Amino acid sequence: MSQPSFSLEKKFADELLATCDEAAKLGYVANEFAAMLETSGGVQTAKKLVRSGEIQSGLLRLRDLGRLDLATEAVMLRPEFKELFNKDHLDAASWHLDQMTASK
């Protein structure tokens, strides 16, 4: 497996920032998440969130807004970004999203 390009990592981070902007339009300002992106970058932030094994409050809020498509996990699972993550990360992202649809 080849290393993902820096430009793909930047595109992923930019997409996560765009989801923050979209969520803010809905009244959910994810300051802590935005700070994590600034400090760690998109890929590392995403890995940290899914590795924790816990459902994050932001994911619950996006579920309540009916916008799970804005979740980090949903962006991770998009075909264009899957190569940035290993199977364990992608499985965890799927599990998190599954929990949100099962508990609704």
Image (cartoon, helix red, strand yellow):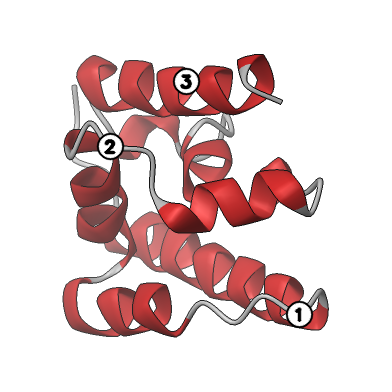
Residue for point 49% across, 64% down? 11
Q: Give the percent coordinates (x, y) of residue 72.
A: 48, 49
Alpha carbon separation for disc pair 2 and 1: 23 Å
Residue for point 39% across, 72% down? 33
Please tell me whether mark 1 sits on a helix, a strand or a loop. Answer: loop
Compare marks 2 and 1 and give the one earlier in the sequence: 1
Residue corresponding to mark 3 = 94
Residue 26, placed above or below residue 62: below
Compare marks 3 and 2 and give the one earlier in the sequence: 2
Residue 50, placed above or below residue 28: above
Q: Give the percent coordinates (x, y) of residue 73.
A: 48, 39
Determine which quarter of the picture holds residue 22.
bottom right
Of marks 3 and 2, the one in the foreground: 2
Callout 1: 10 Å neighbours few (<14), some, many (20+)?
few
Along the viewing direction, whichever of 93 and 65 lies nearer the viewer? 65
Q: Is residue 50 visible?
A: yes
Tell me: 4 left or right of 55: left
Residue corresponding to mark 1 = 27
Marks 3,1: beta carbons within 8 A: no
Residue corresponding to mark 2 = 54
Which label sits on residue 66? none
